[in-house]
Amino acid sequence: MKRFLLFTCLMALPFSYGVAQDAQKSLASTIEVYVFPAAGQAADQQSKDEVECYSWAVSNTGSDPFDLQKQNEQAAAQAQQQVAQTEAATQGAGARGALRGAAAGALIGEVTGGDAGDSAVIGAAAVGISSRRRGRAANQQAQQQAQQQVESSEKATEEQVGNFKKAFSVCLEAKEYMVKS
């Protein structure tokens, strides 16, 4: 029985080692930079060098890829919030426009001696349709602006991350690592 347990544990060891290795992702691989220890540096030395080069790259570029990603996500959320606020405001404007149209139609119908009820319906429909059209145009414009903001933010982030990766790579290459990003 003891031999069976020992054999089972020994057979499972390579599999558990592979799982543990996958769970520990290096700093460089997290930011999609691939590093090979060209001078035979040990794994713990490589980790220290990566942390040191990460700090150096942040201080020299003024960009931290993890902060940039958070900022990009916040900008996208703000853009979506602006679009939602514009939609809510224009929906309310359509209803208020219909109310004003109904009031104006009823007044016109009363003054001209026509049916105030029919005139109110016509006024509400005319002004309501007009308000909805303006509202849709405003929504489309808000969505386009939000999309442009997000794209601009993503482009700037992409450029900053690229500069960061260059600085990070230069630092590691100076420490005799082979680097590809």
Image (tube, rainbow, N blue to C red):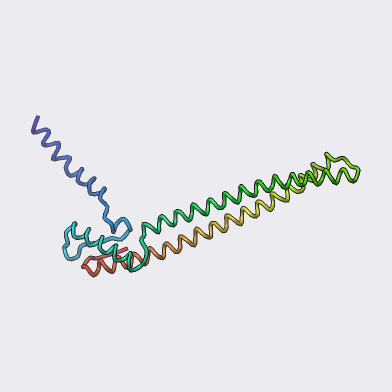
Q: Is residue 89 left or right of residue 122?
A: left
Q: Is residue 13 left or right of residue 159?
A: left
Task: Please tell me which residue lies in front, 9 or 171.
Answer: 171
Quarter of the image for residue 66 reads bottom left
Q: Is residue 31 left or right of residue 120?
A: left
Task: Please tell me which residue lies in front, 80 or 37.
Answer: 80
Tell me which residue sits at (18%, 57%) in the image. 44
Tell me which residue sits at (90%, 46%) in the image. 112
- Point out the image quarter for the C terminus: bottom left
Image position of 35 with respect to 87: above or below: below
Q: Position of residue 90 (x, y in %)?
A: 65, 49
Task: Please tell me which residue lies in front, 159 or 60.
Answer: 60
Q: Position of residue 76 (x, y in %)?
A: 48, 54
Q: Is residue 29 left or right of residue 117?
A: left
Tell me which residue sits at (76%, 46%) in the image. 100
Image position of 85 with respect to 172: above or below: above
Q: Position of residue 93 (x, y in %)?
A: 68, 48
- Point out the image quarter for the N terminus: top left
Tell me which residue sits at (8%, 33%) in the image. 3
Q: Residue furthest top?
A: 1
| Number of numbered callouts drawn | 0
